[in-house]
Amino acid sequence: FQHHPPGAKPITDYIGSRVQFRDDGGVDVDDEMATNVPGVYAIGDIRNTPYKQVVVAASDGCIAAMSIDKYLKGRKNIKVDWIHQ
């Protein structure tokens, strides 16, 4: 169990300056967990959401994985695997 005190900022010094950050220190992402750098995604605590839970990081990871698949395959939309045509 890891406790983050209110106002804690994620450790991001290894990222450098290409990725944009929000004022609270979290990496800025869109709804697909993509950063401003094409092909770079951020999930979990590094986004610095108020919800420091593993289930949130897992959800972020699922969203990012599907978004990365879309990005790598040059799709316009995310392809889900439960619709068979």
Image: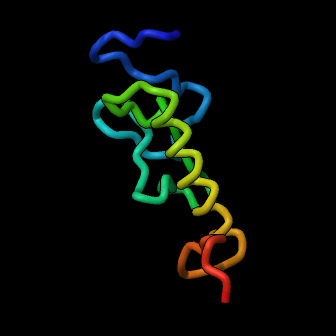
Residue sitting nearer the eye, 81 or 37: 81
- Depicted 63 relative to depicted 43: above or below: below
Determine the image quadrant of residue 7. top left
User: Does residue 73 appear to the left or right of 60 in the view shown?
Assistant: right
Residue sitting nearer the eye, 17 or 30: 30
Q: Position of residue 17 (x, y in %)?
A: 51, 39
User: Does residue 26 appear to the left or right of 84 in the view shown?
Assistant: left
- Depicted 58 relative to depicted 83: above or below: above
The extreme bottom residue here reads: 85
User: Does residue 3 appear to the left or right of 64 in the view shown?
Assistant: left
Q: Residue at x 66, y 71 (%)?
A: 81
Looking at the rendered image, the quarter that the C terminus falls into is: bottom right
Q: Position of residue 34 (x, y in %)?
A: 51, 56
Q: Residue at x 35, y 33 (%)?
A: 49
- Depicted 59 relative to depicted 84: above or below: above
Q: Position of residue 53 (x, y in %)?
A: 45, 26
- Depicted 47 relative to depicted 20: above or below: above
Residue sitting nearer the eye, 6 or 11: 6
Q: How many marks?
A: 0
Q: How is the image coloured?
A: rainbow
The extreme right residue here reads: 73
Q: Residue at x 71, y 75 (%)?
A: 73
